[in-house]
Image (cartoon, helix red, strand yellow):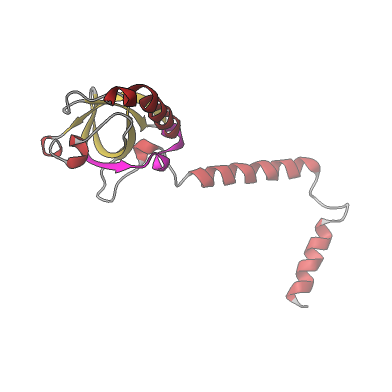
Amino acid sequence: MDCRIKTYVLFRRKLTRKSVMEPSVIRIVFRVCLVLLLGLGTWPLGTPAAQMGVDGTPFVFAVVTEVPKDRSVVTAQVADEGGVSETKLMPIESLLNNTIWRNLEICHSLRIDVKRVADGYQVLGVRALDASMLPMSLQSIAGDCLIKKAVEVAPLVD
């Protein structure tokens, strides 16, 4: 018997009324498939705090929300552990002379290599990003910040 004929016979048996696929079984199979698809579809993404860089250091995404007066402590909205919170970022000494950190302004989007400390994050490395590269939870904050900056801060520069 050809392989195609066996497959046809198997499918034909499932389509008859004597099939074991009753509505309750179909619902259970559908729910199991849905759970598997949703679970496996989001599994590789992880949460922002669970992401690790190439060298094994954890990283988070941040948007600077206040004008930094002192570069040693910067307040930012940080996507960590599945949520967004306002947190203080404190760079290590060698990072204070970094070009990105020296030119840091309100609304800048960052990918930061961090170490968690009691009152915020200690910044080990920083990369500037476009706001579209941020997680969805921070994109709206970055957009609102840019609009606020254009309306309130930019006219004061002149």
Q: Quadrant of the C terminus?
A: top left
Q: Residue furthest front?
A: 158
Query: Closest to the observer: 7 or 104?
Result: 104
Residue 86 in the image: state x and y as whole percent. Answer: 33, 23
Q: Which residue does the image show at 76% across and 77% down from the upper left?
A: 2
Q: To which quarter of the image does residue 35 belong?
A: top right
Above or below, 78 against 18 in this view is above
Is 57 on the left or on the right of 61, as rendered? left
Above or below, 41 against 105 in this view is below
Above or below, 134 against 120 in this view is below
In the rendered structure, which segment of residues is drawn in magenta? 124-138
Is 27 on the left or on the right of 66, as rendered? right
Q: Which residue does the image show at 57% across and 42% down from the upper left?
A: 38
Query: Closest to the observer: 67 or 36?
Result: 67
Residue 40 in the image: state x and y as whole percent. Answer: 52, 47
Query: Closest to the observer: 30 or 95?
Result: 95
- Number of numbered discs overlaid on the protein picture: 0
Q: Residue furthest right?
A: 17
Q: Residue furthest bottom?
A: 1
Residue 54 in the image: state x and y as whole percent. Answer: 28, 51
Q: Quadrant of the N terminus?
A: bottom right
Q: Is residue 113 magenta?
A: no
Q: To which quarter of the image does residue 76 belong?
A: top left
Residue 151 in the image: state x and y as whole percent. Answer: 39, 24
Q: Is residue 137 magenta?
A: yes
